Each structure stands twice: as structure tokens, then as C-alpha cells.
Image (cartoon, rainbow, N blue to C red):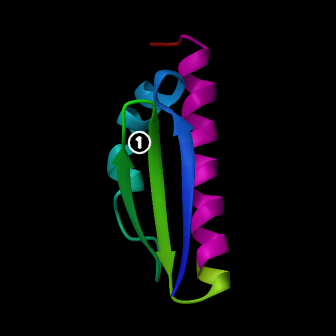
Amino acid sequence: MFKVKLTLKKAEYLKYLEAIKPEVTETFGRSTVSLDEDELNIYIVIEAPDPSSLRASISSITRVLNVTKKIMEEDVW
């Protein structure tokens, strides 16, 4: 099993992660994703059975997070 923990600053990314929480907490192919947090950070934990699944999941999550951040920063709401 392969595992990666992405660390994001809570003050900076909380509103973006709340917007994509349903996307992030579901299963990505053969990978599972969970969210953890402490006072300062939010952690996206990705577990996968092989490196290619892990890479695909990381790419998907970062892409969704990037798009959400760009949309919210445009202030179109």
C-alpha cells in the first residue's frame, strides 16, 4: 500500500476544501482519500495499492482544488 499526505494551510485553503469536500472524500479509482486536520493545517491523505493509482489520484485532487481556487478567486459568486 502506498500513502501520501498533502498538507494545506487551514487559514488559506479551508473555504476551497469545503467547496470540494464531496469530491475529495470519495474513492478515486483504486485509491481512498480522507481528510484530517489540526489547528493550523488540513491534511488530504491518499492511499493506493500501487504507484500509478496514487499518482492519478494526486493529479485528480490537485486539479479539482486548483480549478475551485481559480473560480472562487475570480469572485463570480
Q: In the depicted view, which residue is nearer to us: 20 or 34?
A: 34
> Is residue 57 found inside the magenta-colored segment of the image?
yes
Q: Tell me residue 38's x, y (percent).
A: 36, 39
Under mark 1, the amino acid is Ile
Callout count: 1
Q: Tell me residue 2's x, y (percent).
A: 56, 81
The magenta segment is 54-75
Image quadrant occupied by the C terminus: top left
- The residue carrying pointer 1 sits among few (fewer than 14), some (14 to 19) or many (20 or more) residues within 10 Å by Cα, namely some
Q: Which residue corresponds to the image point at 46% horizontal and 77% vertical from the top-left?
A: 31
Element assignment for label 1: helix
Q: Which residue corresponds to the image point at 48% horizontal and 21% vertical from the top-left?
A: 11
Q: Is residue 4 left or right of residue 36?
A: right
Q: Which residue corresponds to the image point at 36% horizontal and 43% vertical from the top-left?
A: 37
Q: In the depicted view, which residue is nearer to us: 44 or 24?
A: 44
Q: Is residue 71 left or right of residue 40?
A: right
Q: Tell me residue 6's x, y (percent).
A: 57, 53
The residue wearing badge 1 is: 20
Q: In the depicted view, which residue is nearer to us: 7 or 63?
A: 7
Examine the residues drawn in magenta and state their main secondary structure: helix
Q: Quadrant of residue 75?
A: top right
Residue at the outermost front position: 39
Q: Which residue corresponds to the image point at 43% horizontal and 37% vertical from the top-left?
A: 17
| Residue 33 versus residue 37 in the image, above or below | below
Q: Quadrant of residue 67?
A: top right
Q: In the depicted view, which residue is nearer to us: 2 or 73?
A: 2
| Residue 13 versus residue 67 in the image, above or below | above
Q: Quadrant of residue 60?
A: bottom right
> Is residue 67 found inside the magenta-colored segment of the image?
yes
| Residue 16 versus residue 66 in the image, above or below | above
Q: Tell me residue 64's x, y (percent).
A: 56, 47
